Image (tube, helix red, strand yellow):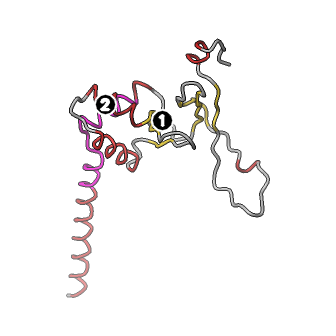
Amino acid sequence: MNRKIFFAARQFVRFVATIIEDKMATVRKRSTRQRKAILEVLEEFGRPLAFDEIFNGAKERCPGIGERTVFRNLSEMVDEMELARVHYPGQPNRYELPSPTGSHHLHFICRVCNQVYSLPFETPDLKDSIPKHPDFVYEGEEVILFGHCRECGTSTGGTPS
């Protein structure tokens, strides 16, 4: 009798866990006008955007949206891997849509306008080609290309390479 109760209880727990998982997936992937506005802004610009850029664009699409709502949604969307956070020293956090292939791609920072652009190239794996140092354990690398964008190259008299 105890064995039957045990198996029935275990089956009930699995059933409840399935219901909870389904509900959590629905809540996590909820689609609100605020999230839709944030995604539209990121899709329109097609590059990593700072909070202010996202907020201003979202506000145009959804006039009543507040800064806290945008910040909360960005944090949740990063946690849910719907967005990627891009951070470089001396730069504000930026947010972008993840790469369709899931690979890490290169970024370019314009030194004139300070914009960050995504480049459609995979980041080369450098970690294994750098000699090992006895005092450090390498965990990863970050490749940043910088210079000036087409618009700034034209305005400063230079030409983009």
Q: From the viewer's perspective, is residue 122 above or below residue 154?
A: below
Q: Residue at x 26, y 36 (%)?
A: 34
Label 1 – label 2 distance at C-alpha: 23 Å
Q: Amino acid at mark 2?
A: Ala
The front one of 100 and 60 is: 60
Q: Residue at x 40, y 28 (%)?
A: 43
Quadrant where the C terminus is found in the figure: top right
The front one of 149 and 139 is: 149
Mark identifier at residue 100: 1
Per the rendered image, the range of residues in magenta is 22-42
Q: From the viewer's perspective, is residue 83 above or below residue 146?
A: below
The front one of 65 and 105 is: 65
Mark identifier at residue 3: none
- Judge whether residue 23 is colored magenta: yes
Secondary structure of the residue carrying numbered label 1 = loop
- Judge whether residue 80 is colored magenta: no
Q: Amino acid at mark 1?
A: Pro
Instruction: State the residue position of label 2.
Output: 58
